[in-house]
Amino acid sequence: MVTTSTGDAQPPRAPLGSWPTPLEPMPRLARALGLGADDLWVKRDDLTGLGGGGNKVRKLEWTCGAALAEGATVLVTTGAPQSNHARLTAAAGARLGLDVVLVLAGDSGSSESGNLTLDGLFGARVVWAGEGGKDEIAATARHVAGTLRDRGAVPALIPFGGSSALGARGYVECGKELLTQVPDLASVVVALGSGGTMAGLVGSLGPERVLGVHCGAVTEPARVVSDLVSGLSGTHCPPESLRIRLDQVGAGYPVLTEPVMTALTLAARTEGIVLDPIYTGRAMAGLTAAVRAGEITPGRRTVFLHSGGLPGLFGHPPTLARAAAELAVDGDPLSI
Ligand SMILES: *Cc1c(COP(=O)(O)O)cnc(C)c1O
């Protein structure tokens, strides 16, 4: 199951996704934003193939490759209740024949839809870690791993969001893939959660061409990304060299903002592309703000990295209510 490349010192990689992902034009959205029709393209990393798709598949190929090489029998990871990473770790475990334990923030019953529906189908076991912070969740995950070890299993801890220097290799590869598809790439716009996606892209494209939109998942996004880039490349990446927009967090990570709702409806109605309220919606709202600010300009090639997240939309009641309200019509527009 694990492919080991010959000759160089590449770590083992578990094949989980379908590569390369498609690149598609978004001419109607480009014009709506004030760009030229040919200026804006979307990299469809929502179509990575495994378990409903999304950016975490690229990182899991490396972290699961390492887990298999170490003889792991069970994957343990952490996240929010609607974590796309947790869902895709559950799918990866199913694909690779490994058990999966998800240590999630909150309490049982706080949410059952969206990603959790899929976690259940994939056969993952969920341990609820309560409302404590990241340190408490990480401590619960270590405790779970210890208990599994006592029972004779071999647990592998997959990092939060899959974001370690190893996991970020998946996005170094994505950056290379993108350059073969768009040789004249000026900017790629990407949601910044746990940081590995942006870090990997910076690793292969350099800091000038990558615009990260902070989603509120970590407290110091620039430091997190710069540490990951430094870990990847072995050379220091100054946090100030990174392009990061901090203006799309709003009232906090789980909360729907008006610019995000606008971005969701705009992408849906111009291109038939579905974004999610937490990550890709923020990235698109950040792209819109960057065009307004003159940071992204007509005549240069911009790529929006679609990182997935569709199941999370169906686990986010405020967004579902707003979308349902769009169905309401006054009177009968079809009366004939
Ligand atoms: C996790 C996630 C991101 C952010 O990726 P990171 O590597 O954690 O920064 C973006 N979009 C979606 C849909 C995600 O699930």
Image: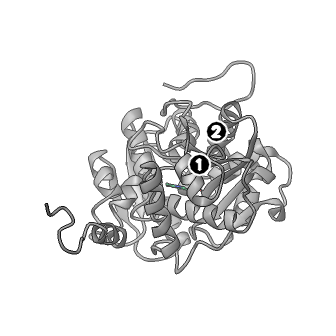
Q: Can residue 223 be seen in this view?
A: no
Residue at (48, 33) in percent of width and height: 16
Q: Report the front residue among 329 and 78.
A: 329
Residue 305: numbered disc: 1
Residue 116, x across and y down, in percent: 32, 57
Q: Report the front residue among 124 and 198.
A: 198
Q: In this view, does 9 lie to the left or right of 266?
A: right
Vertical order, 3 against 244 (above or below)? above
- Judge the density around disc 1: few (<14), some (14-19), many (≥20) Cα neighbours within 10 Å: many
Circles 2 and 1: CB atoms closer than 8 Å: yes
Residue denoted by label 2: 174
Question: Mark 2 and mark 1: span between their CA atoms?
Answer: 10 Å
Q: Report the front residue among 89 and 330.
A: 330
Which quadrant of the render holds ligand 1?
A: bottom right
Residue at (54, 30) in percent of width and height: 19
Residue 127, x across and y down, in percent: 36, 62
Q: Earlier in the sequence, mark 2 or mark 1?
A: 2
Residue at (37, 54) in percent of width and height: 311
The furthest residue to the bottom: 251
Q: What element carries label 1?
A: strand
For the residue with label 2, is its CB less than 8 Å from the closest atom of ligand 1? no
Q: Is mark 2 on a helix, strand or loop?
A: helix
